Image: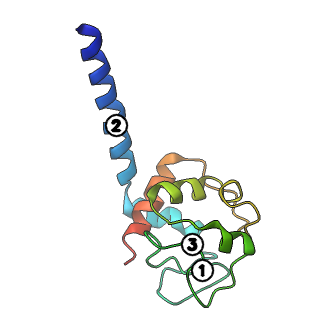
């Protein structure tokens, strides 16, 4: 019985930490996003080197009609939810080999969580 209680407590701690981490800090994410803002706008309909990230959370990949996506991104068929964005921001070329995006990724999970929290505010 003690072992079962320990397993339940361990699972609760792991899942609790994961859900807390996914929330992130949108204000901190806005600051970290400055690295992304070189290539991406946050205004609807404004593309730069990369597509606008306004409304990106929940959007299908390669879905902005007036942006020239790579063939790899067109074929990727992703939905930009928190988990997929986390993978993307970690290492874009690993998630979508052949992407035109040259960003190497954010190594810090906290930075990624914060950026995703910020992107979630862009609606």
Front-most of residues 28 and 121: 121
Query: Label 1's element?
Result: loop
In-image side of 22 versus 36 (left or right): left
On the image, numbered disc 3 is attached to which residue?
61
Query: Label 3's element?
Result: loop
On the image, numbered disc 2 is attached to which residue?
15
The Cα atoms of the two marked residues, 1 and 3, are separated by 10 Å
Q: Which residue is drawn at 51% across and 47% down?
A: 109
Q: Residues within 10 Å of mark 2 (few under 14, many from 20)?
A: few
- The relative height of residue 40 versus residue 82 in the rendered view (above or below) is below
Residue 114 lies, in percent from the top left, at 44, 57
The Cα atoms of the two marked residues, 1 and 2, are separated by 33 Å
Q: Which residue is drawn at 50% across and 66% down?
A: 79
For discs 2 and 3, the disc positioned in front in the rendered view: 3
On the image, numbered disc 1 is attached to which residue?
51
- State yes or no: discs 2 and 3 in contact (Cβ < 8 Å): no
- The relative height of residue 34 versus residue 95 in the rendered view (above or below) is below
Q: Which of marks 2 and 3 is nearer the N terminus?
A: 2
């Amino acid at each position: 019985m003690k072992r079962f209680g320990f397993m339940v407590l361990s699972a609760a701690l792991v899942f609790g930490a994961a859900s807390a981490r996914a929330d992130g800090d949108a204000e901190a994410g806005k600051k970290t996003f400055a690295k992304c803002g070189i290539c991406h706008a946050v205004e609807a309909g404004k593309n730069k080197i990369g597509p606008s990230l306004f409304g990106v959370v929940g959007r299908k990949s390669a879905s902005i009609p007036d942006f020239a996506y790579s063939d790899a991104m067109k074929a990727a068929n992703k939905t930009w939810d928190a988990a997929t964005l986390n993978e993307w921001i970690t290492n874009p070329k690993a998630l979508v080999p052949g992407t035109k995006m040259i960003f190497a990724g954010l190594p810090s999970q906290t930075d990624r969580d914060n950026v995703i929290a910020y992107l979630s505010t862009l609606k």
